[in-house]
Image: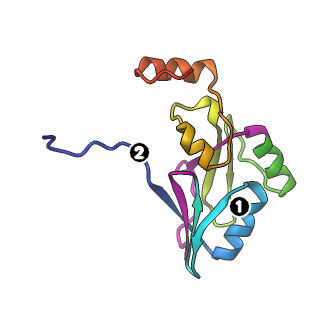
Amino acid sequence: MATKPRVIGFNHVALEVGDIEEALAFHGRIFDFRLRGKSATIAFIDLGDQFIALQSRRKQSADDGRHVGLVVDDKEAGRAALKAAGVKPIDGQFLDFRDPWGNRVEVVAYDNIQFTKATNGLRGMGLTLLTKNENAKKELAEKGMAVS
C-alpha cells in the first residue's frame, strides 16, 4: 500500500471571473464548448472527462506567469477566433491571452501535447480521431505510452 496518493490527472480548474454570463459570452466568442451547468455564481464548461469552473467574484490582480493551458483541436482556428473577438494575444512564443478579469489562458494544440484522449472520450465530445505530431509521439513513447 502506498504511503501517499499518486496524482494522476486533473478533474477541473476554477477561474474567478467578474460575472458568469459575461464570462460565458466572452469565452463563447473564442471557443466552441458545451456548458455542463451553471448557477448565478458558477458555470461549468465541459472538456470531455474534465471541466473548467468559472466562479464569480474575482478580486486579485491580473495573472502574469500563472495561467491555464486549454487544449484545442485547431490552434490556428483559436488564433483567428481571438482576432475576430478583438482579443489581443500576449506577446511571446505561445498563444496566450487574458480574459477581461485578468485570467491568463494559453491555447495549446492537441497534436503537440503528451496527454491523449481515449477514442470513446473523443467520440463523446463529437470529435474524430485527433493525431499527435512527431515530438509528442516521441515524448509519449519515452514514457511507455506510445500512440499510433
Q: Is residue 21 above or below residue 46?
A: below
Q: Position of residue 10 (x, y in %)?
A: 43, 49
Whole-percent x and y of residue 132? 62, 26
Tell me the magenta residue range: 48-76
Which quadrant is the C terminus positioned in? Answer: top right
| Element at label 2 | loop
Q: Is residue 120 above or below residue 28?
A: above
Q: Which residue is mark 2?
A: 9
| Residue at x 73%, y 39% (from the top left corner) | 75
Queried whether the magenta region covers residue 59, the answer comes back as yes
Residue 86 occupies quadrant = bottom right
Residue 142's image quarter? Answer: top left
Is 17 placed left or right of 30 in the picture?
left
Write down the residue under mark 1.
27
Task: Report if residue 82 lies within the magenta region.
Answer: no
Q: Position of residue 38 (x, y in %)?
A: 58, 74
What separation in Å lies between label 1 and label 2 (alpha carbons)? 24 Å
Mark 1 burial class by Cα count in 10 Å: few <14, some 14-19, many 20+: some
Q: Amino acid at mark 2?
A: Gly
